[in-house]
Image: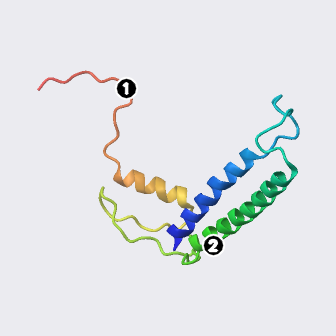
Amino acid sequence: MQTVVIVIHLMIVAVMIGAVLLQKSEGGGLGMGGGAGFMSSRGTANLLSRTTAILAAGFFLTSLFLSWYAGYNRAPSSIIGQPASQTQPAGGGPITPPTSGGILDTLKKADEQQQAPAAPSGPQVPRSQ
């Protein structure tokens, strides 16, 4: 269903681009406004204007349908109140839940538990074996 509507949507877009490009420029924005053009009669201008309006309405409706259809089966969800995952970290022992403090304190304690012995702070003298 969605694929059919997307194909119709793209066909409407292509035809609407063509209809807009065929219309006569009234402002002469790029210095091309004068003279007799390909579609210079009043009847074709009205036809192109109506065609553009109908295509714009179709574009609007297909866009609304596609956005509605994309969220049709989506259930509302919240990250607040969801239980934490019970997976073990790859590095070692269990992480105890915090008794006080916030998430930053918990992450700092977990990092300290998983961290290897501290690296030396400066250059070291090589030791012979």
| Disc 1 to disc 2: CB gap under 8 Å | no
The answer to whether 5 is drawn above or below residue 128 in the figure is below
From this viewpoint, is residue 80 visible? no
**In the rendered image, which residue does mark 1 sit on?**
122
Q: Position of residue 113 (x, y in %)?
A: 37, 54
Disc 2 marks which amino acid?
Trp
Task: Kindly identify which numbered label has been placed on residue 102.
Answer: none
Residue 33 is left or right of residue 111, and the answer is right
Q: Which quarter of the rendering shows the C terminus?
A: top left
Q: Which mark lies nearer to you, 1 or 2?
A: 2
List the single residue furthest toward the left: 129
Image position, residue 31 (x, y; %):
83, 28
Identify the element where label 2 is drawn: helix
Is residue 124 or residue 52 the one in the foreground? 52
- Residue drawn at x 74%, y 65% is 57
> In this picture, is 92 found above or below 126?
below
Q: Amino acid at mark 1?
A: Gly
**Which mark, by number, is residue 68?**
2
Q: Residue at x 35, y 68 (%)?
A: 87
CA distance for labels 1 and 2? 61 Å
Q: Can residue 58 be seen from the camera position used here?
A: yes
The location of residue 102, given as percent across then percent down, is 57, 61
Q: Helix, strand or loop at disc 1? A: loop
Q: Residue at x 48, y 75 (%)?
A: 83
Tell me if mark 2 has few (under 14), some (14-19) or many (20+) residues whose alpha carbon lies within 10 angstroms of its own.
few
Q: Quadrant of residue 7?
A: bottom right
Mark 1 or mark 2, earlier in chain? 2
Q: Nearer the viewer, residue 123 or 114?
A: 114
**What's the coloring here?**
rainbow
Residue 119 position in % (x across, y down): 34, 36
Total numbered labels: 2
